[in-house]
Amino acid sequence: MIQITPHMRILLAVEPVDFRKGIDGLAALCRTVLNSDPFSGCLFVFLNRRRTAIKILCYDGQGFWMCQKRLSQGRFKWWPGEGQDLEKSLDAHELQMLIWNGDPSYTRIAPMWRRIQA
């Protein structure tokens, strides 16, 4: 089971992806397009061309997990604009908002805690 924690690295692919691809096809996109190692334990988030579904790919040390959410009606409203960046980093709470078809750019939480240097 995939557990999303605040310290996880989450990468979102900006360009839409052909959802006929399975685990191997998405892992290849992680290497070639996102320049990331699919075995790193990161969560990789992909959107289909019609903006009706997202897929999440993750490696847990034993194998790959792939989850898909397809909306029963409507389309995902928020997705970063296509520009120079091929990927966007998300925080855990932003991914949870995206999964519920919300806009992660409007989520407000307390700032991430960091140790103060003495």
Image: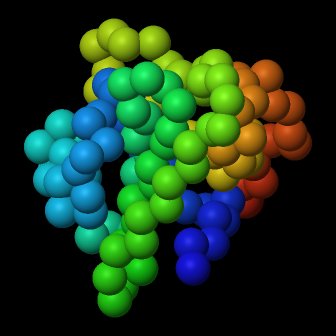
Question: Above or below — where is 91 with respect to 74?
Answer: below
Query: Which of the 4 quarters of the picture holds residue 34?
Result: top left
Q: Residue at coordinates 37% horizontally, 25% vertically from top-left?
A: 49
> For this view, does 28 lie left or right of residue 100?
left
> For this view, does 92 lie left or right of residue 24?
right
Query: Would you say residue 43 is visible in this rendering?
Result: no
Q: Residue at coordinates 87% horizontally, 42% vertically from top-left?
A: 110
View extreme (bottom): residue: 62
Image location of residue 74, percent across then percent down: 66, 23
Image location of residue 98, percent across then percent down: 66, 37
Q: Nearer the viewer, residue 77 or 105?
A: 77
Image location of residue 47, percent across then percent down: 43, 35
Question: Above or below — where is 60 with respect to 39?
Answer: below
Q: Residue at coordinates 34% horizontally, 74% vertically from top-left?
A: 64
View extreme (front): residue: 72
Query: Which of the 4 quarters of the picture holds residue 32?
Result: top left
Q: Nearer the viewer, residue 101 or 59?
A: 101
Q: Residue at coordinates 40% horizontally, 41% vertically from top-left?
A: 46
Image location of residue 23, percent across then percent down: 26, 63
> Could you tell me which quadrant the C terminus lies in?
bottom right
> Could you tell me which quadrant the N terminus lies in?
bottom right
Query: Would you say residue 108 is visible in this rendering?
Result: yes
